[in-house]
Image (cartoon, grey):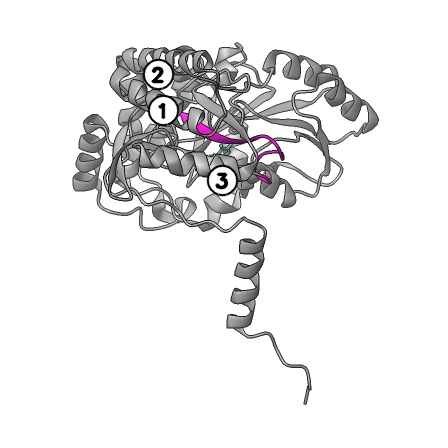
């Protein structure tokens, strides 16, 4: 008989929740009481929504919903098995061909989400003796994916090309060398210097791996992404990872690259092998999304018009948007409490925008992260700017 008393479930839950509260990291998700649109309802209020990743306004778009309904009717509610056993419907493969053609790559494979895609690709491609060099600000799903990999892992300073070069030079290997970067960084809205990254990677015989979650549907001709923006779409030594959950408005992740990459992932990527694929409605909505962005250039135009307008007006009011180059527009408030307070005050004035503090962003750089979409009207943005001006003055962040 052991005399040790085991931890009870309630004991574990209370102590962990207490630690989160003490550290100011306790999260309670805001609930949207209406569809994901540029104007929605939060906490009983009509709000201008600056918090989503719905860049093109596709999440509630009729063209996507009609295709989803049709696929649901014609193909059913679910895939019925994991893709490798009996869950690959012809619509899955048709969509993957459509996506590969759109991305100008040899092939594309769709997984359940961007998160599982990083797990699946990094987990199945890398072996002992390989080297991975990762930007320090890369997304959590890359960090978790790398935990599954037996390769040697090194970090380089954010977008610091000298540091990237140093790390590659200091860690020679006859294994695979992989440089991993986000295409667009989700907190600052800055773009990875892929022209330089790919050039340096090539100097050291390394492959470049770009997670384009925030670049796909945002950058490049017709939203083909960061890799296309820099002209590397046909490169055999560049792997593109992305999400179908942000600009494309639905859910899912993809890996696009040489044909053999797709083949290996089908055989090795554990989320592909052991978790059921997308239901037909998801596939339908996604195929409509890729079609719509190519048929109608106005989505991309409005996204960028709105981005330029909103950023310029915030700067004119005296706010610091931290050098963002994309629709992700941070407004710096300094300490976390100030950012959270500003978010509360904005909500009271009918603007839904989320505050982010340490450890999500560095201390002293707490911010509200705004994401402008193609769906916002000038009126929406002007209403948000008026609220920002008032809150910024009340809190002493801007003059006037
Ligand atoms: C959002 C995001 C993901 C996760 O994508 P999901 O499809 O939501 O799982 C992965 N990588 C980056 C860089 C992201 O911003």
User: Of helix, strand and loop, which mostly describes the magenta segment?
Assistant: loop
- Decide if ligand 1 comes within 8 Å of the CB at mark 2: no
* Residue at screen point 27% across, 15% down: 378
Q: Residue at x 57, y 65 (%)?
A: 15
- Residue ID for mark 3: 115
Q: Is residue 370 a member of the stretch shown in magenta? A: yes
Residue 396: x %, y % from top left:
49, 26
Asked whether disc 1 touches disc 2, contact meaning CB atoms under 8 Å apart, the reply is yes
Name which of mark 3 and mark 1 comes first in the sequence: 1
Disc 3: CA contacts within 10 A as few (<14), some (14-19) or many (>=20): many
| Left or right of 361 in this view: 224 | left
Establish if 17 lies above or below 336: below
For label 1, the residue is: 55
Identify the residue under disc 2.
303
Could you tell me which secondary element the residue under label 2 belongs to? Answer: helix
N-terminal label among 2 and 3: 3
Identify the image quadrant of the N terminus.
bottom right
Q: Nearer the viewer, residue 9 or 235?
A: 9
Place residue 12 in its image quadrant: bottom right
Looking at the rendered structure, the secondary structure element under dot 3 is helix
- Asked if 4 appears above or below 56 in the picture, the reply is below
- Can I make out residue 135 in this image? yes
Residue 338 part of the magenta-drawn span: no
The foreground one among 397 and 319 is: 397
Report the Cα–Cα distance between label 1 and label 2. Answer: 7 Å
Residue 149 in picture, x, y percent from top left: 65, 42
Is the distance from the Cβ of mark 3 to the nearest ligand 1 atom less than 8 Å?
yes
Label pair 2/3, CB-CB below 8 angstroms: no
The structure residue drawn at horizontal position 81% and vertical position 29%, both measured from the top left corner, is 171
């Amino acid at each position: 008989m052991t005399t040790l008393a085991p931890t009870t479930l309630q004991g574990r839950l209370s102590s962990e929740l207490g630690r989160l509260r003490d550290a100011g990291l306790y999260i309670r998700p805001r609930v949207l009481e209406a569809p994901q649109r540029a104007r929605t309802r939060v906490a009983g209020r009509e709000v201008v929504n600056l918090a989503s990743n719905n860049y093109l306004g596709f999440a509630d778009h009729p063209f996507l919903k009609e295709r989803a309904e049709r696929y649901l009717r014609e193909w059913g509610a679910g895939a019925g098995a994991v893709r490798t056993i009996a869950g690959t419907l012809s619509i899955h493969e048709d969509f993957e061909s459509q996506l590969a053609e759109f991305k100008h790559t040899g092939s594309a494979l769709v997984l359940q989400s961007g998160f599982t895609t990083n797990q699946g690709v990094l987990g199945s491609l890398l072996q002992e003796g390989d080297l991975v060099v990762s930007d320090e600000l890369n997304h959590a799903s890359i960090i978790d994916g790398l935990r599954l990999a037996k390769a040697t892992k090194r970090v380089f300073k954010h977008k610091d090309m000298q540091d990237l070069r140093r790390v590659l030079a200091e860690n020679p290997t006859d294994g695979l060398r992989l440089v991993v970067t986000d295409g667009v960084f989700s907190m600052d809205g800055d773009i990875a210097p892929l022209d330089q990254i790919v050039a340096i990677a090539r100097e050291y015989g390394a492959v470049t791996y770009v997670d384009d979650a925030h670049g796909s549907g945002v950058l490049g001709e017709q939203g083909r992404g960061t890799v296309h923006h820099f002209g590397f779409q046909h490169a055999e030594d560049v792997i593109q990872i992305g999400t179908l959950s942000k600009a494309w408005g639905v859910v899912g992740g993809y890996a696009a690259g040489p044909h053999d990459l797709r083949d290996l992932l089908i055989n090795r990527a554990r989320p592909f092998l052991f978790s059921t694929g997308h239901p037909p409605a998801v596939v339908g909505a996604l195929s409509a999304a890729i079609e719509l962005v190519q048929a109608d250039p106005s989505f991309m135009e409005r996204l960028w018009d709105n981005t330029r307008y909103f950023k310029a007006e915030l700067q004119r009011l005296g706010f610091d948007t931290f050098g963002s180059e994309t629709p992700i527009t941070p407004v710096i408030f300094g300490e976390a409490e100030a950012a959270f307070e500003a978010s509360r005050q904005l909500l009271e004035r009918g603007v839904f925008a989320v505050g982010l503090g340490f450890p999500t962003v560095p201390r002293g750089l707490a911010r509200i992260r705004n994401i402008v979409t193609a769906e916002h009207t000038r009126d929406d943005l002007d209403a948000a700017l008026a609220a920002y001006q008032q809150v910024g003055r009340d809190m002493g962040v801007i003059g006037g």
